[in-house]
Image: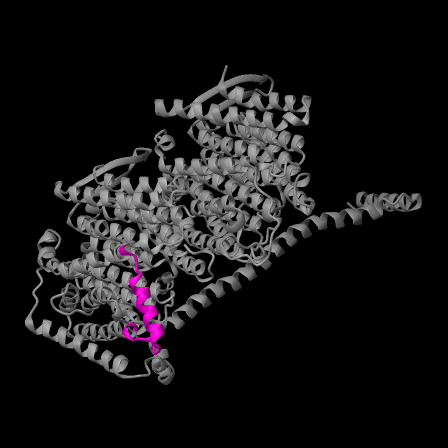
Amino acid sequence: MNVIAIMIILPLIALLAEIALSKRYSLTIVSISTFIMLAIVSYLLVVGFIHGSILVAQSYAYIIAPSISISLYLNIASLMLLLMASVVLFVASISGNIGAERAKLSSALMLLFQLAATGIFTSGTLIQFFIFWDIGVITAFVMINTLGTASSKKASMTFLIYEIFASAMLLFAILLIYFGTPLHTFNIQAIISGSNSMPVSAQGLIFFFMALAFMVNMPLFPFHSWLPGAYAEASTQGSMALAGILSKFGAFGLLLTFEMLPIASHYSIYVAGLAIVSSIYASIVMLSQTDIKRIIAYAAMVEMGIIALGISAFNVFGTYGALYGMLAQGLTIAFMFLIAGAIVFEFGERDMRLLKGVIANAKASAYSLVVGVLALSGLPLTSGFIADLLIFIGAYKSFSIYGLVPLFAIILMVAYMYYLLNKSVLSSRDRNWNVAYLGVSQKIGYGIFIAFIFVFGILPFVLLNMVH
Amino acid sequence: MLALLAIVPLAIAALLSPILKSRYDAVRYLSLAASIVSLILIAVLGTAPAGTQSITWFSIGGYAFHITTQTYALNMLLLYIIAIITPLIIAYSIGFMGVPSEQARYYFELDIFAAAMMLFAMSGNFIAMLIGWEMLGITSYLLIGFWHRRDAPPNAARKAITIVFIGDMMMLAAMVIIWVSYGTFNFSLLLRAQSSAALYIAMLLVMFAAFTKSAQFPFHEWLPDAMEGPTPVSAFLHSSTMVKAGVFIIAALLPLYMELHMGTLLVIFGIVTAIIGVLNALAESDIKRILAYSTIEDMGLMFVALGFGSLIAAMLLFVVQAFYKALLFMNAGTIMRANDESRSIHALYGSSSYKPLFIVMLIGVLSIAGIFPISGFFGKLGVEISATSIYAYAVLLAIDMLSSIYIFKWLLLPMRHQSSVYDQNATAWNYKLTPKSMMVPQYLLAGIVIAAGIAYIYIPSMLGSYSSAQMHFSVVGASAETVAVVLGAFIALYIFKLHPYASKLKEKHRYVFLSAYNSVASNAVYYYIGKAFLILSKAFEAFDYALLGFASAGGRSFVMFGNLVRKVENGQTNIYAIAFVLGIMLLLIMVLFK
């Protein structure tokens, strides 16, 4: 049987076990489930690295009449995203639930999210893409609404409204592809190979709706209003999953849109423009944030803008740079949210102006935050550098000097991140905190993230040599 | 990758430091041993034939990205300097860093710092260069902010990294432009490339990136603040690492700058920076910040020489400056240590009471001032005579004279003694307590500073493949330089030795002081730029809320519409009946009058 099918069935079995067994086992179950996913993805990575390429395609008939089949498809792009998702999910499972609150619910949600992530990144048809998209959105909604902070209700509703709007647009676009073009298929590979037979007018419409849906999800300016609230008010696991993985649904979708629709290359300049504006905008708004989680949320948006720029550049550097960027950004931002969650747990404070001298009482979190900032700044030997280099090469190729404008956003973002470090981590204490001590599992989580950030920064050839 | 072997010992030592955290003695001697092994490896590397080596880091869609190292004369020159200075700095640190608990972190950062600079020095393409380049920035951030519990160091570190990071991004942009335009990152291939508009932009970006690293106007203000770091770090940062990176990258790409006629830009920025540096150094009274402004000035002079196309003159100053600046910082650290870590030059006393220290200080000062035959003389004179215009020469001569004033001030003021005999004895005793590990590197460096004069003979032949132009020191030039320096020394002697109220000069000549000490103005400019961004950010944030409000208003409009429609469906039969009748009438009218 296909390994991908195992990966998709795995969280379902784990979910059943989760429901059947008592609360005591919930953390174990989710950890095992996500670890198996990580192991399978690593196995695929090794196989791919040895063969120099990777492509797994598997199809199962599902509904005959409108000819819907279940099709699993995995290439290097999906592998990169799965790799990121599996690391983030694994760490979020073992160390994301810092206060061990509502263990059963949070574990179950993580498993659902695992299902969504595995499904969407391996989906061979748009129907699967849509179904797993919605599973992810609803799971994230519950993560914000039920597990989030006290003020998360409003943020979760905003999130839900935006995301459901996005998925409605997505569904509309999918139906347009099926009924509005001579292809009459949901299969993504079939659409890509037959894309030239699509009428231009239909393509334009499809592109519009798809791009809209994905830009809301990523998010890009001006569809980002849900972002600060949702990222900041979600539980730590929720923030990690949302910023690390859910935002990649949109980016992955945008990538597919560019592959599926030949007309996309005409409109890419608009997407790029929006991406550049988005990253600059987010970096400037970020400068007046004081809540650590909101700062990280806007940092995530800056990076997503840069990733969108890479996607819209639509050449080999831009595309794979964007994918590497998703890998790097997913790890880094999830890492930062884990640290932020840990700091909130340790100090009970999220405002960087009040949070002083973290390094004195919480060394692990403080050092990790420094590493996180370094990774975010795209320091060479961290994964972010490879991503930045490739994305900007791609962007410069397609949009000449305008493609380099987001470097300015990176400067602002990183400058503010160092300000954050000064304010919260390094400055001396002026009051006595009752510091809660972090468990070992969080420190292991830090370690795993740091290890992967450096591994993909030092050994990029493991993944990129598979690109032909 | 033979060349990369040289940085392996330091990298291993760095990685072992956190593991050996509790055994701080092991950590520091391990670092020292690693740096000595690196020195030996680099010496061996120097005997191997020069060349480039490259490995493919990764390839994507048929395009390969390499990490290339090269060991040509210019690279070896910088490598030798780093390799010689690193063990001395680490030895000095052993005496200097008293607190055991922070040792592991210190040596971890210091070792990576040295390794990064070595990687930078041997880089043969932009990727290897950028790895070293950014690692330098990050480790300097960590080292400047090493004493993070104090107030000033974190802010100084942030200032440094913010400015340096701007340079990093410029460098990345330049790399991208070069890759897309020429399909290579390799320096030696790039040097043969056809010039184009894209290359001009890229080289401009590289130049400004170099300015951020080498603390050139308008990015110079981070360097004096970086004095908040431990003194060995300052000695390292100002002599062979970090600030030298900017000069070196321009030197390595100098033919391109000459081809694109960008020399004048380098000269202008260099001279402006040198003037700023020398004026600030004159007005400054912090023992370490004087040296920092002096570094800014020296770097400016190197850029001037490069701008005039004289690689040899620039490299001559490059070499000698490394040694005298390292020595002077070590002297400063020793004096501060004996005076309870005060840093104001007016509160430091008794340096003449400890003869070994005073002699090495004198050697350093004579070198930086430029007195024949100590090495600094050749460096300063080389830059002066590289000037192709008489005005530039005059300015350079004036700068040298002024720098002679402040450096003799730096020497003379700490020589004084306190008024009470008890204090004098206490200070003299403090000097005698200076650890051996702090003094030995200074003796060695003093020896090197004297001997480095031979660079005048060796560098032109060593760099013969880069530049055919030879350097000719004329007696007239040398005499003019010496006269200027001696004049400066006498002025300093008159003001600071014979004038009893040296520390009052600041108040007495306030306007002179303020016009010289323009560091305040530069900082104000930085401050207002930051402020402008914050104001912009506030406006954007308001807009961000408005955007959410706009979306909410959209949602609310649906609710309002619902409320409006709901009024119709109120369950009152008579109103339904009226509406029904009205509707029928409307329909009838429409049908009848069609």
How far from the left and from the top, in percent, is residue A207? 52, 39
Q: Determine if the magenta segment contains residue B346.
A: no
Residue A71's place in the image compared with A348, above or below, is above
How far from the left and from the top, in percent, is residue A385? 38, 43
Q: Main secondary structure of the magenta part?
A: helix
Task: Say if residue A314 shows up in the picture.
Answer: no
Judging from the image, the colouring scheme is one colour
Residue B434's place in the image compared with A81, above or below, is below
Q: Which residues are magenta?
A: B414-436
The outermost residue toward the top is A1
Q: Nearer the viewer, residue A102 or B487?
A: B487
Question: Residue shown at 43%/23% (left/top)?
Answer: A44
Residue A394 picture quarter? top left
Q: Nearer the viewer, residue A457 or B501?
A: B501
On-image quarter of the C terminus of chain A: top left
Q: Determine if the magenta segment contains residue B418.
A: yes
**Viewed as shown, does residue B280 lie left or right of A308?**
left
